[in-house]
Amino acid sequence: MIFSLVGVVGAGQMGNGIAQVIASKGISTILVDVNEDALAKALETIAKSCDRLIKKQKISDDDKASLLANISVSTDMKALGDCDLVIEAATENIDLKLKIFQQLDEVCNKECLLASNTSSISITKIAAATNRPENVVGMHFMNPVPLMKLVEGIRGLQTSDDAFERVKSFAEFLGKTFVVAQKDMPGFVVNRILLPMINEAIYTLHEGIATVEDIDAAMMLGTNQPMGPLTLADFIGLDTCLSIMQVLYEGMGDSKYRPCPLLVKYVEAGWYGKKSGRGFYNYAT
Ligand SMILES: NC(=O)c1ccc[n+]([C@@H]2O[C@H](COP(=O)([O-])OP(=O)(O)OC[C@H]3O[C@@H](n4cnc5c(N)ncnc54)[C@H](O)[C@@H]3O)[C@@H](O)[C@H]2O)c1
């Protein structure tokens, strides 16, 4: 085992999935969030996810019990002091992430590797906020983490080969396929390609070219995508989609990345997609 104690910062849809996958491999995992409710909801989500896996006979009741026993939660960053690796999966906001990495740098032991699950923000900039930039790596999981096979690895300018290789080995140990973004550019690989497509789907709706359902059906049946782009946007979170588009737009300085005004309006309304109950579709139960 490469790491015996791993921390995850941010217990939202990505953080809880990352904690679940790590804990399922027998590794003690500490999940930290500023919001107690988010931590309680994360444990509930992980338990439900285990129940689905039990139903599919992929894990046993005992596996669920030991997985849950491997996870502890805290609202205090200091709980991460003894970790070998901390993966940050908090809200996609540059100022917030810089602050979190400064805090992690203070509380974590000197050898601890720090990884960010950011979808688009510069790993180089995040690394520069710490006194251990060589030990900061981009580790971009996909949603939902227990099901999706990919982890995208991103090297900041300062990332050491040793730190990068250890994160790669760990991703592979978790059963993921690791692809490498050779350059730390906005959106890396997946979101450089995916988010402009989603943004264009939102423009297609905004300009009245087709309905939500028809845009999704067109892309599913016409281009063989398993899920339409507007459904996928709701699953990612429209706040996250907007943040990624803003990083692409500002980072590349190219108008082709400008976020669709309709996306901005939905986020202003608090319509963040599945996690808030409403996005392009209604998820209220
Ligand atoms: N949603 C996706 O499909 C997806 C996929 C890959 C990567 N990501 C990235 O993962 C990260 C998290 O995304 P998400 O979808 O899980 O968001 P989310 O909104 O579901 O969860 C974010 C969590 O971060 C917590 N948080 C905020 N400030 C914090 C702080 N200072 N300390 C600790 N926790 C804090 C919030 O309370 C919340 O629980 C983002 O960087 C996002 O870009 C998202």
Image (cartoon, grey):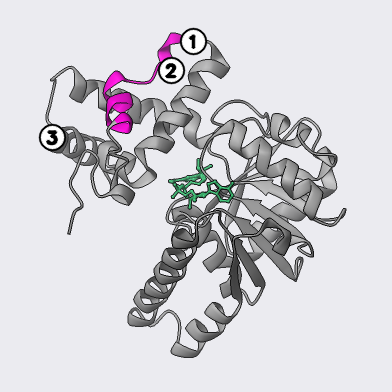
- Given the image, on which type of amino acid does mark 1 rest? Asp
Against 147, residue 60 (above or below) is: below
**257 or 12: nearer the viewer:** 12
Amino acid at pointer 2: Tyr
> From which residue to which does the magenta span run?
255-268
Please state if 222 lies on the left or on the right of 130 as rendered: left
**Circle 2 is placed at which residue position?**
257
Q: Are marks 3 and 1 in contact (CB under 8 Å)?
A: no
Residue that label 1 marks = 254
Q: Is residue 163 visible?
A: yes
Say which residue appears at 76% left-offset and 34% top-offset. 129
From the viewer's perspective, is 268 left or right of 144?
A: left
**Amino acid beneath label 3:** Asp
Give the spatial CA distance, label 3 vs label 1. Answer: 29 Å
Q: Answer whether labels 2 and 3 touch (C-beta < 8 Å).
A: no
Residue 164 can be seen, yes or no: no
- Quarter occupied by the C terminus: bottom left
Query: Based on the displayed image, in which of its 4 quarters is residue 153 positioned?
Result: top right
Q: Is residue 239 left or right of residue 18?
A: left
Other-residue count near label 3 (Cα within 10 Å), few / some / many at <14 / 14–19 / ≥20: few
Q: Residue at x 20, y 38 (%)?
A: 216
Please name the predominant secondary structure of the magenta segment in the image.
helix
Residue plotted at (61% across, 74% down)? 25
Q: Which residue is mark 3?
A: 214
- SS type, badge 1: loop
Residue 111 percent across, percent down from the top left:
86, 55
